[in-house]
Amino acid sequence: MSQVIVVRGRLAKRAREEAEKLGVSVDEYLVELLSQGLDPKSKAVEYIEAAKELLKEAREELGKGNVRQAAEKLWSATALAVKAYAYSKDNKQLTSHHDLWEYSKKLIDEFGEWISDSWNAGNAMHTCFYEGWCSRKHVELALKRVEKLVKEITSRVKNSMS
């Protein structure tokens, strides 16, 4: 069951500013903030669950015609999934876009070349959100690739917990 918490005014502005300083979405920022103190495996689970929720929200935004919001949700799901795998597999925290790009090379080696398409599709959605250049079709195609990435990482994160 999805729950909504509305944050307005000064707190909302502060959350957005802090996320922007770190170069992450507000969703990513809040997941990191709320998972402080958890061990890496538990953090991985929080991150992958958040990624799955963001995929759902991306589909909903797309259904409403909110292409840019859907794109940002897809980028966040991509980044959180990669971060989840880094926590799960290597007990490693990825804190920057550079870290994500570097780690994506490891994913390509472990998962296969298809991961490059998924990573690039998710990454393009970040640009789409900020620049507004992409179409609904771009987001629909990216959604399929990001879903595959999140599904595979979910499976591996869950298996590492066993």
Image (cartoon, rainbow, N blue to C red):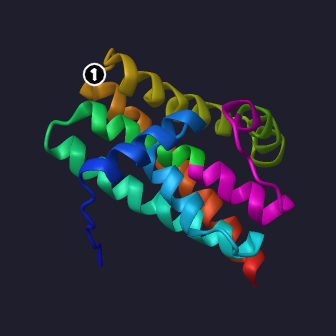
Query: Going by the picture, which residue comes out furthest to the front?
Result: 10
The magenta stretch spans residue 26: no
Q: Nearer the viewer, residue 136 or 22?
A: 22
Residue in front for this viewpoint, 142 or 22: 22
Q: Is residue 149 left or right of residue 110?
A: left
Residue at image position (41%, 42%) is 16
Residue displayed at 57% across by 61% down: 33
Q: Where is residue 48 in the image (x, y as percent from the top left)?
A: 57, 63
The stretch of residues the image draws in magenta is 80-100
Q: Is residue 157 above or below residue 27?
A: below
Q: Is residue 135 above or below residue 123?
A: above
> Can you tell which quarter of the image residue 144 is in?
top left
Given residues 15 and 131, the one toward you in this image is: 15
Examine the structure image and report whether residue 96 is included in the region drawn in magenta.
yes
Q: Position of residue 109 (x, y in %)?
A: 84, 41
**What residue sits 43% from the left and 35% below the top?**
142
Q: Name the residue under label 1.
A: 135
Dot 1: element: loop
Query: Does any portion of residue 160 appear in the rendered image?
Result: yes
As drawn, 139 above or below 64: above
